[in-house]
Amino acid sequence: MKVEYFKTFITVVNEKSLSKAGKLLNLTQPAITKHLQSLEEYFNTILLERNVKGIKLTDDGALLYKYAQEILKILEEAEQNISGNKENPKGILNIGASNIPGQYLLPLLLGRYNLAYPQVKVNLEISDTGDVVAKILDGIYDVGAVGSEIKNPRLEFVPFYKDELVFILPANHPLTQKEVLEPDDLLKIPLIWREKGSGTRMFLEKALKNFGISEKKLKIVMELGSNQAVLTAVEGGLGGAFCSEIAVRNATKLGLVSTHRIKGLALQRDLFLLYLKRKKQHPLINHFINLALSEFSLLRR
């Protein structure tokens, strides 16, 4: 069975058209048809149904589509691992990151990575911690950067940056002159919270629980899906919020918000790089993690 047949099959399914797949693969339509027929003969089943609406996978076809993706992914890993000792590694590195590392830490790091390994194409997507972890487990991302560690025996988490959450208030709030707030102050202020799945929220809820503050006692008036949205809401006077210090640094300098700490509440946390343990020797992942640890070691406070 030729690997090209799996590539053809996946492309036809993705494009939902033999002619479009042929253009992408630089193959004639008869060649595409031959590849598909070879697969169907080999597995002794019908993989695709063709009708006026296009192409539809059969149940067996859907199963093979999943396996074919895994096969090509493993072959890609093998190629990258075997070529990992070369001076100029090449390949594709898919990275998923939550808001804080994705917006404030990785962009400059990726610029340095590109200079060091120009033949590696890097794709970065920003989501929440839960989504990043799920896509690492599914093999969609090669490496992730998140704000909370989630226990899973298949995953390796590597701390790379020491972050701190601070409490921010609108610039005209009565408590702006009070650098350290009392815990009871939190119970009186309308709060803007991050969405479920956010690493910031996971860490914060655990820290508050350990501190003796129940989420039920808080006046949470809204949940927003990014640090920037939370910051904008606070600037607009809608309430207070916990945010990463690096995310509010500029707004604080410009006087748009005031930054505070809560008496007795420690909110320092590690940000983590993560990857599947079975990819431990993946050269592109190793190069990326080593560069991150080197670059951010000077910033760990």
Image (tube, grey):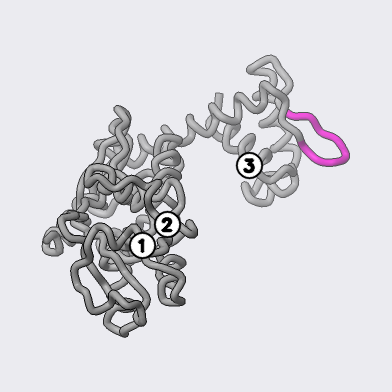
| Amino acid type, label 2 | Lys
Circle 2 — which element?
strand
**Direction top: furthest residue:** 44
Residue 297 position in % (x across, y down): 13, 58
What whole-number distance in Å separates the C-alpha atoms at marks 2 and 3?
51 Å
User: Mark 1 or mark 3: which is in front?
Assistant: 1
Residue 269 position in % (x across, y down): 21, 52
Q: Disc number at residue 188?
A: 1
Does residue 175 show up magenta in the picture? no
Does residue 51 show up magenta in the picture? yes
Magenta range is 48-55
Residue position marked by numbered label 3 in the rendering: 11
Image-based side of 165 in relation to 47, left or right? left
What whole-number distance in Å separates the C-alpha atoms at marks 2 and 1?
7 Å
Image-based side of 195 in relation to 77, left or right? right
Question: Is tag 2's residue or tag 1's residue first in the polypeptide sequence?
Answer: 1
